Amino acid sequence: MRIIPAQLPEDGLRLTGKEPADLEEIHDDVEIDKVNPVNYDVLAQLVSGHLLVRGALKTRARLICARCGQVFSHTVTEPDFIAEREVADPHQPVDLTSEVRESILLALPTQPLCRATCRGLCPRCGSNLNREACRCPPVTAPRGGAFDGLALQ
Ligand SMILES: [Zn+2]
Ligand SMILES: [Zn+2]
């Protein structure tokens, strides 16, 4: 999102459009498969030497489920996007791409789940339990303490 502050009318300018996100290139520690371009709908204003941009961001991300590892599609919205930059030369374009990216990253779920009821993978055979019931015996906690039945000498 590039804005030339000198071109903004006094009461601000509404800007809508798309911003390429390319998040997978800058944050490979976050489990994102891919993020689509970010749609923005913001009001840009020059207020006493500061560029003020406020509005909403929305995109669709392909995330990796923390339980089953499947890639799923998720709508990411940031209704309260705010960016502020001090403007030295209002004729120089201000690039807010990094603010947009950062804001979308913060809006991503920290533990993405493909669905709230995701059953995850079987810890023994690795089957995706959302798709199939595996033949492993159910994991049950052992009854009593591990030392029950051991005679202390
Ligand atoms: Zn899942
Ligand atoms: Zn299993």
Image (cartoon, rainbow, N blue to C red):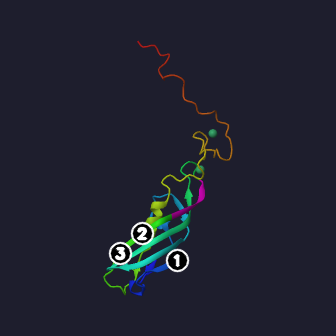
* Residue lying furthest front: 11
* Quadrant position of the C terminus in the picture: top left
What residue did someone put label 2 on? 82
Q: Provide residue 97's location: percent of width, then percent of height.
A: 44, 73
| Residue 90 in which image quadrant | bottom left
Disc with the residue nearer the chain's start (1 vs 3): 1
In-front residue for pair 87/61? 87
Q: Provide residue 12's location: percent of width, then percent of height.
A: 43, 80
> Distance of mark 1 from mark 3, alpha carbons?
19 Å
In-front residue for pair 71/114? 114
The reply, left or right, for residue 92 in relation to residue 121 is left
In-front residue for pair 72/96? 96
The kind of residue on which mark 3 rests is Arg
The kind of residue on which mark 2 rests is Ile
Q: Residue 75 lies in magenta, yes or no? A: yes
What residue did someone put label 1 on? 16
> Distance of mark 3 from mark 2, alpha carbons?
10 Å
The reply, left or right, for residue 71 in relation to residue 4 is right
What residue did someone put label 3 on? 85
> Distance of mark 1 from mark 2, alpha carbons?
15 Å
Residue stretch in magenta = 70-77
Q: Provide residue 131's location: percent of width, then percent of height.
A: 68, 47
The kind of residue on which mark 1 rests is Thr
Tag 2 secondary structure:
strand
Above or below, 22 relative to 117: below
